[in-house]
Amino acid sequence: MKREYQDAGGSSGAADMGSCKDKVMAAAAGEEEEVDELLAALGYKVRSSDMADVAQKLEQLEMAMGMGGVSAPGAADDGFVSHLATDTVHYNPSDLSSWVESMLSELNAPPPPLPPAPPAHRHASTSSTVTGGGGSGYFDHPAAVDSSSSTYTLRPIPLPLVAPADPSADSAREPKRMRTGGGSTSSSSSSSSSLGGGASRGSVVETAPPATQASTAANAPPVPVVMVDTQEAGIRLVHALLACAEAVQQENFAAADALVKQIPTLAASQGGAMRKVAAYFGEALARRVYRFRPAPDSSLLDAAFADLLHAHFYESCPYLKFAHFTANQAILEAFAGCRRVHVVDFDIKQGMQWPALLQALALRPGGPPSFRLTGVGPPQPDETDALQQVGWKLAQFAHTIRVDFQYRGLVAATLADLEPFMLQPESEQDANDEPEVIAVNSVFELHRLLAQPGALEKVLGTVQAVRPRIVTVVEQEANHNSGKFLDRFTESLHYYSTMFDSLEGGSSGQSELSPPAAGCGTDQVMSEVYLGRQICNVVACEGAERTERHETLGQWRNRLGRAGFEPVHLGSNAYKQASTLLALFAGGDGYRVEEKDGCLTLAWHTRPLITTSAWRVAAA
């Protein structure tokens, strides 16, 4: 896409300028024209019909400031430009035309005429083509062009900007006319159709040389001008996120405010997972900077929405399926040969984990055992018994596969409210009956207890008191509980970037566990919202409100070891079946199952994301 501007004198230039003004007024009287896409990518709002006027102002501004730079030392113009460069700083203006007018009025002097082209040097036109985003992003003249000559380029204004503090009346301007590539006079710029269907990363806006040079232009190479580079913008985006987090840690909220405002623009230049995860982290940083904490789920609608997000996350990616499958396999092996079994689920939600275990027990040689399930869940805002509804559904399923099933729901605002007698086996009806074997299951729940001092120790003490045969624990493989905000932010940025990458990569392969439907895209979007709520909690919240305090397997090993538990090796059978599960889910591409110290870890390529471990009460 090319835009060229040429100085012209006499009545022809005045007539062309009048035509430009007529079109601008006609556009203002009708519907508003579209903003120029190339300048909009840099954050400037300039209508296509205003391009000639903006270019004229920029040439006058550059000429006026250039004359000040070449005047004698101590001259008034030089001192005034120096004053502009040091005393007044404005951030990137969205209205480029108004900003240039204010600069011209601050200089308070009419622009000098364009200098004539040197007779001994004739250059080709400097209008350039759209180039890819592989350059450095700087505006470099070729060796044959003197930057102080009459060849000008329309440059994006760097950050931070130098601008006047008190704009006054607009200064006089010489009439100009814009010359298009075809040589005809026009008052509007060429269309943006030369972007090549969006394949190019960069865009170019330049002015043409004076008529004395354009008429003799020959074979000099064009000047490529890269205005948008997605790779460079991606690096700047990460730097802006980390710099903003560092400013928050240092409680420099003025700097954090300036940085957090740049993040949406930089994120918009990216695509795919990078844009999405940056948007969520930008929102979380903004909430922390402006002290607008997310409200906890306190209404019936909030609770229903949280359950909906959880269900979509279950369907769209294998993380919850992997967690349920590996935990069930460990419980199934622990229940081998037992006739009466009891599972305590620390967060039963919709009970999606247990039909698979009931079915596996029903197929066990010798017949299924008597199965009792205790489901723990939070109180409902409308005081309905949602846990009982889950129990009815599971009881119906158990009846169809002929499994003796009992269910009890425990409502608890926090797991720390549980007492050992609530989880104890029922009193034996017959002294000859086999004692009940207990398993305790926790999927993404123990890390929430770290927000309450002493809560984890109390819960682990309650679990130890009921003497379970096995305790299954599934947690995120990340350290989001660091005392330093910047460390926590950096770790969470890497972790959730990988999670979003896996959602993007997993969506390309059709799951064999879910029927192909148009809802696959909805599942992914809702899963991103599910993860975005976690990001917001990790970054924006503190104290008891920050419940997403994920820790690594090594940290959980230390905590559980101090509480009197020892690890149970999950075995190779669970590893093989988990690998088969992932192959069915997304063709086995990207996801990896790894065995680490007797535990199973699900990774996206080389980054571990969640870990399943099994524990039992250590021998005295």
Image: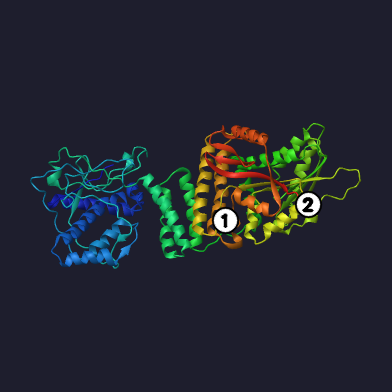
Q: Name the residue under label 1.
A: 481
Query: Disc 2 marks which residue?
Result: 466
Which residue is nearer to you in this view: 576 or 4?
576
Q: Which of 165 and 30 is in front in this view?
A: 165
Indicate the position of residue 136 as horizontal and vertical percent values: 31, 46
Compared across the picture, whether 272 is left or right of 213 comes to right
Residue lying at the far left in this picture: please name it: 119
Q: In this view, does 207 lie to the left or right of 484?
A: left
Can residue 428 be seen here?
Answer: yes
Q: How crowded is mark 2: few (under 14 residues within 10 Å), some or many (20 or more)?
A: some
Image x and y of residue 242, in percent: 44, 55
Residue at 55%, 61% in the rendered image: 293
Amino acid on which the number 2 mark rests in the picture: Val
Q: Residue at x 48, y 47 (%)?
A: 276
**Does residue 164 lie above or below 214 as drawn?**
below
Q: Is residue 381 visible?
A: no
Question: Toward which corner of the image does residue 364 lie, by quadrant?
Answer: top right
SS class, disc 2: loop
State the quadrant of the N terminus.
top left
How far is disc 2 from disc 1 in space, using C-alphas? 29 Å
Q: Is residue 185 or residue 551 the one in the foreground? A: 551
Q: Where is residue 323 in the image (x, y as percent from the top left)?
A: 64, 42
- Is 45 on the left or on the right of 594, as rendered? left
Amino acid carrying label 1: it is: Asn
Secondary element at tag 1: loop
Q: Point out the tag, 2 or 1, that comes first from the N-terminus.
A: 2
Q: How crowded is mark 1: few (under 14 residues within 10 Å), some or many (20 or more)?
A: many
Q: Position of residue 183 (x, y in %)?
A: 19, 41
Name the residue at the front extreme. 620
Q: In which quarter of the image is residue 563?
A: bottom right
Q: How many numbered circles are shown? A: 2
